[in-house]
């Protein structure tokens, strides 16, 4: 479909809640979203795209057609959106890890002796599933810890088939299993009871389980069943320790989750801290591709939906740095899902605020740790290239500036940045040759004409064509540069670098007078500012050198025995006319022959005596 056809189709949608699926020419789903009013939301994609961020513009450019699914409420839209994202894994949605990253604990059902096992995904097989949890290794250790605390078997024997066939394994001898394989071991009923206790732990209900076991321990003690009471006491202690130390269990037992988010140049990161009774029990961090221009609240909503929807056990409170859109709908969905009220909270002060900062720092450090300097630079150059209308990264950037004091000593500088770094071996200086009075525009025209004519002539010192020109100045400077290149039959994107009243970089300017803001991206703002400062520094340095040299040369005119070569020698040695004038005769003799040194000395000292 054409852009206009997509726009019209979106305009024809009803004002009802629903989910939309954007698809490319191959029919692949590239983005899934939800909306309270489908018509308004979907139409926004096909209106003026200049208001979109970089990621949205790229997505819209790939859309060939879209489908919609109408639902009866925002709640249903949220649930359906999450389900479709997990099914299609669209490239432009923010995606958490796949199921391999978040394993489940599976418990067999309808068998005499059910076992726990670790699986990558849930299946419709009649089994009971717990999770998802944080990692495969941690989940495996958690299964072993729960079974060890309840003294359940973890060996490969099958019950009741293998009861009484072999001697008990090492786990029984070291007290980690009660020997269900022994002929006189615990009964099937006892095994089933402990499995139910293990289910309580995996469901995050270890407090309730501990309370039940304490009641059984007291009853056993009253009945003088001291051995059983001691065993229950040991089990209570093991479960209490387990509930406090196992991070994989903490992720579902925590009564409070605290989230932090960080948007970097290349990636975004989210971290969640699991808190129980004020204690930090565990931490999870997720990093995924997303630019700094992504809206934090939208990112957080996508992450929260994928993280929590589908979990059976949830914390009572979720603390967030920003409240995402439709947070009430998400809270309602989570509350219905787990059977108790889940509150999304935006802390402002106190302990929770400190934890929010800690979570945010965790997210930032993880993003920065895995993002290389090259990735950051390339992302910044991508943003600059997009502003200049380039299809790719501007690997070679040339920048020009004019410097003068009156009609004399007019100079220009050319600096080169390659992949975001100064390439000083390619810096060049120009002396303005065709002007007898200051005129920055004509000077810029002359410099660029000379530079690019030498490129056309095959000069090895100017044999590369830049991807982008940055001119120190505004609209007229950029327009002058564009005219110079057009006269030579060349096309290179050109932007002017505009300063504010304090001579600080403010924005970029096109030859047509369109101002392009760069302050929304601190890395891009810093790069443009650095280029502008460097080209200005190089121009000023050359101008000062030339002005000093010309001043020195003019003061030495007419001195017997001092020609151009000896003037250069004096300039190189002393650096300024003031230093030459103050030099002793013995110092001058080191540079000049006797008579010439005497003539220079007498000129300046004779003037001093007058």
Image: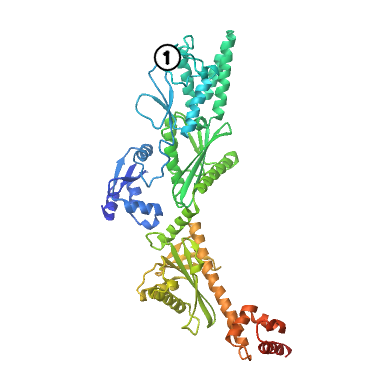
For this rendering, which residue is in front, 222 or 351?
Answer: 222
Observer-nearest of 211 and 388: 388
Q: Residue furthest right?
A: 609
Image coordinates for residue 137, horizontal then vertical, percent:
48, 32
> Is 136 above or below relative to 295?
above
Q: Kindly state the secondary structure of the residue where label 1 is placed.
A: loop
Q: Quadrant of the C terminus?
A: bottom right
Asked whether residue 418 appears in the rendered view, the answer is: yes
Q: Residue at x 51, y 57 (%)?
A: 522
Q: Where is residue 84 drawn, in percent x and y? A: 34, 39
Instruction: Judge the density around disc 1: few (<14), some (14-19), many (≥20) Cα neighbours within 10 Å.
Output: some
The residue nearer to you, when weighing 258 against 347, is 258
Question: Residue 257: horizontal and vertical position, in percent?
Answer: 52, 36
With respect to residue 506, does 411 lie above or below? below
The residue under label 1 is 162
On screen, residue 49 versus residue 533, left or right, reads: left
Q: Eyeballing the image, is 90 above or below 577? A: above
Q: Where on the picture, by quarter, is residue 349?
A: top right
Q: Position of residue 274 (x, y in %)?
A: 53, 35
Residue 75, image quadrant:
top left
Total numbered circles: 1
Q: Residue at x 50, y 22 (%)?
A: 147
- In the displayed orientation, state which residue is furthest to the top: 224
Whether residue 15 can be seen here: no
């Amino acid at each position: 479909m054409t852009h206009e056809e997509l726009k019209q189709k979106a305009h024809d949608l009803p004002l009802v809640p629903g989910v939309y699926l954007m698809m490319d020419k191959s029919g692949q789903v590239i983005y899934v979203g939800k909306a309270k009013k489908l018509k308004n939301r979907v139409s926004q994609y096909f209106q003026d795209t200049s208001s979109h961020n970089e990621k949205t513009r790229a997505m819209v450019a790939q859309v060939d057609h879209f489908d919609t699914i109408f639902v009866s409420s925002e709640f249903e839209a949220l649930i359906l959106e999450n389900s479709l994202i997990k099914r299609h894994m669209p490239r432009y949605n923010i995606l958490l890890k796949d199921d391999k990253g978040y394993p489940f604990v599976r418990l067999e059902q309808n068998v005499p002796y059910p076992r726990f096992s670790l699986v990558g995904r849930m299946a419709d097989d009649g089994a009971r599933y717990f999770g998802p949890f944080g990692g495969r290794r941690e989940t495996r250790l958690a299964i072993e810890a729960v079974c060890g605390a309840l003294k359940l078997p973890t060996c490969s024997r099958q019950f009741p088939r293998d009861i009484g066939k072999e001697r008990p394994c090492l786990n029984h001898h070291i007290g980690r299993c009660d020997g269900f394989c022994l002929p006189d071991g615990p009964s099937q009923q006892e095994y089933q009871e402990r499995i139910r206790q293990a289910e309580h732990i995996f469901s995050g209900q270890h407090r309730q389980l501990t309370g039940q076991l304490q009641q059984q321990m007291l009853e056993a003690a009253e009945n003088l069943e001291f051995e059983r009471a001691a065993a229950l006491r040991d089990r209570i202690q093991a479960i209490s320790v387990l509930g406090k130390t196992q991070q994989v269990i903490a992720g579902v037992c925590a009564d409070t989750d605290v989230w932090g988010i960080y948007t970097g140049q290349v990636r975004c990161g989210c971290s969640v801290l699991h808190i129980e009774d004020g204690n930090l029990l565990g931490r999870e961090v997720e990093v995924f591709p997303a630019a700094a221009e992504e809206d934090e609240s939208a990112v957080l909503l996508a992450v929260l939906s994928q993280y929590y929807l589908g979990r059976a056990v949830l914390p009572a409170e979720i603390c967030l740095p920003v409240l995402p859109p439709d947070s009430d709908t998400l809270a309602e969905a989570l509350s219905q899902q787990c059977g108790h009220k889940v509150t999304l909270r935006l802390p402002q002060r106190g302990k929770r605020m400190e934890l929010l900062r800690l979570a945010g720092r965790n997210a930032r450090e993880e993003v920065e740790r895995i993002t290389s300097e090259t990735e950051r630079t390339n992302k910044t150059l991508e943003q600059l290239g997009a502003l200049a209308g380039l299809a790719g990264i501007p690997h070679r950037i040339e920048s020009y500036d004019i410097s003068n004091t009156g009609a004399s000593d007019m100079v220009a500088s050319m600096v080169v940045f390659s992949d975001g770094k100064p390439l000083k071996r390619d810096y060049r200086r120009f002396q303005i040759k065709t002007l007898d009075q200051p005129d920055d525009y004509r000077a810029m025209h002359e410099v660029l004409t000379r530079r690019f004519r030498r490129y056309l002539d095959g000069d090895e010192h100017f044999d590369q064509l830049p991807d982008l020109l940055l001119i120190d100045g505004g609209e007229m400077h950029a327009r002058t540069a564009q005219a110079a290149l057009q006269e030579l039959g060349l096309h290179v994107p050109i932007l002017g670098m505009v300063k504010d009243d304090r001579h600080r970089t403010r924005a970029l300017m096109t030859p047509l007078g369109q101002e392009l803001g760069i302050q929304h991206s601190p890395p891009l703002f810093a790069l443009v500012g650095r280029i502008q400062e460097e080209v200005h520094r190089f121009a000023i340095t050359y101008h000062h050198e030339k002005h000093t040299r010309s001043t020195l040369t003019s003061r030495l005119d007419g001195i017997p025995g001092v020609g151009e070569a000896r003037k250069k020698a004096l300039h190189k040695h002393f650096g300024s006319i003031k230093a030459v004038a103050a030099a002793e005769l013995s110092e001058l003799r080191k540079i000049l022959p006797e008579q010439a040194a005497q003539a220079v000395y007498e000129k300046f000292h004779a003037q001093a005596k007058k």
